[in-house]
Amino acid sequence: METEAEPDTVILPTVWLYLQSLDAQPFFLGLVLSAFSLTELLSGPMFGYWSDRTGKTKSVILLSNCFEIAGNFMYFVGISKWFLLGSRLVAGVGAGAGASIFGYLTRCSSTKDRVPVFAMAMACRQAGLLIGPAFNVFLRYCTFHIGPFYVDKFSAPGIFMCALWTLMQFVVIFMFYDLTPSPMESLHQEREPLLKQTDDQSPLYGSINCVHDPSSNQDDLSSLENPVTASDSSITNNPICSHDSERNETTKKSVVGLVREEIVVLLTAQFVTFFNQTALETLVTPLAQTYLGFEDLQNSLLYFLCGIEMLFGFLVVRTLSRCCSDRIILAFGLFICNISCIWCLLFLAKPTGSYGFLLAEFVIGVFLQVLGLPFVSVSQVSLFSKVTAEKTQGFNHGLRRSVGGVATILGPLWAAGLTQNLYIMLGTMMGLLILISVMVILSYKYLVEPAESED
């Protein structure tokens, strides 16, 4: 299943050609790619909050899969370019479950194992990115009817993904289970509101065989003189009321606590990473078609090779996490991304030369861009989960993914509108990378897991 905001990768290599067959203008590609991210941005925090409050991640996933099934079926039907746009809006709602999935992964892993767990989760996504485009090699030969609908190389990815999401529903129903707290953990959570009242009481508070303290008479008299205060304290000591009030107070504190320097840096890294990634993805297909003559088969092979590279990158990050801290991995990933953007500015903003030279420039630029993504994405997600409250991880990751959703909306729109003016487009990407690099350097000492006493 998806763990980050990105459209189904089987669709990506052919979506531009599909839109061209429906008489769509170049800017419409940016609208279609951004539509998925728009609804994912809105649904992510809601799904995350739902899973935090109820603890039922399975229900969230089952509901979100229904939107994925409906959206991909609409893509298969493909009546017009506007219907295609609507299909991505519907499918994007289902991607919001990624916030609940990341919250689930955070709760079932320790901080020491956080990077390997997230790296493996994202590696599974990249395995899908690796395998997905490869299916177009076979889907491009589809020419048959399903009832009134004609299946060709453009609509086949839609019905194929619809079938896969339907299969996923049965996998989740029979093979996925929500976390159940242990009896000791549940007992601790029930008693925790009462125990916190001892901060203002004597050490013998709540003891059955305590020695009578003369000062208790004074407390009794004061309680009689202030009946309202006594009733308020009885309500506070009620386990149910205390638990609900504490949970609401924890949520408020967690939301307020998100406005901290290190969290702002990590959310900015999320935005810049996804903005540059989606902008480059939007640029790759038209650029390869214009200068290299790539069609659907070549685009599928290109995404296939990028998937192999990213899968290898996530495995490298998982290995490095044993000896390197999250912030070192983040800094290294940003360094590679800066080198990639400089290369693209020098060689891809105005491509010249023979076909072989153009191909080499294009491949190296894409290779460098893809190489840095695993280092930045895994490290900033891991750090974000460590510096935010564990009780609201679903909502926190929903907010993080919403920031990424804004980036994946603006990225394709920005790139699609500037395909003829690459210096401005790539210069903006370079400026964002310089900004986040400076922010990481200035806040480097804060990008660590806080001590347990600070929770």
Image (tube, rainbow, N blue to C red):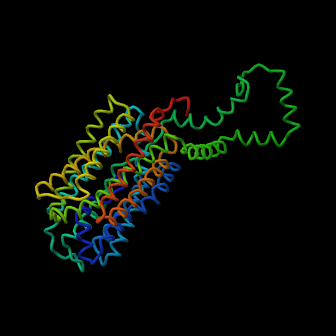
Left or right of 349, for residue 99: right
Whole-percent x, y for residue 23 in the image? 27, 78
Relative depth, front residue between 13 and 231: 13
Whole-percent x, y for residue 410 in the image? 40, 60
Residue depicted at 18% across the width and 56% down the height: 302
Q: Quadrant of the C terminus?
A: top right
| Residue 173 in sight in this render | no
Left or right of 308, for residue 121: right
Whole-percent x, y for residue 420 in the image? 29, 66
Relative depth, front residue between 385 and 61: 385
Can you tell which quarter of the image residue 379 is in? top left
Can you tell which quarter of the image residue 165 is in? bottom left
Left or right of 350, for residue 36: right
Residue at the farthest bottom position: 148
Residue depicted at 37% across the width and 55% down the height: 428
| Residue 453 in sight in this render | yes
Whole-percent x, y for residue 364 in the image? 20, 49
Relative depth, front residue between 179 and 421: 421
Relative depth, front residue between 272 and 441: 441
Relative to 44, say whether 256 is above or below. above
Relative to 234, say whether 72 is above or below. below
Please state the total of marks drawn on the protein image.
0
Left or right of 232, for residue 432: left
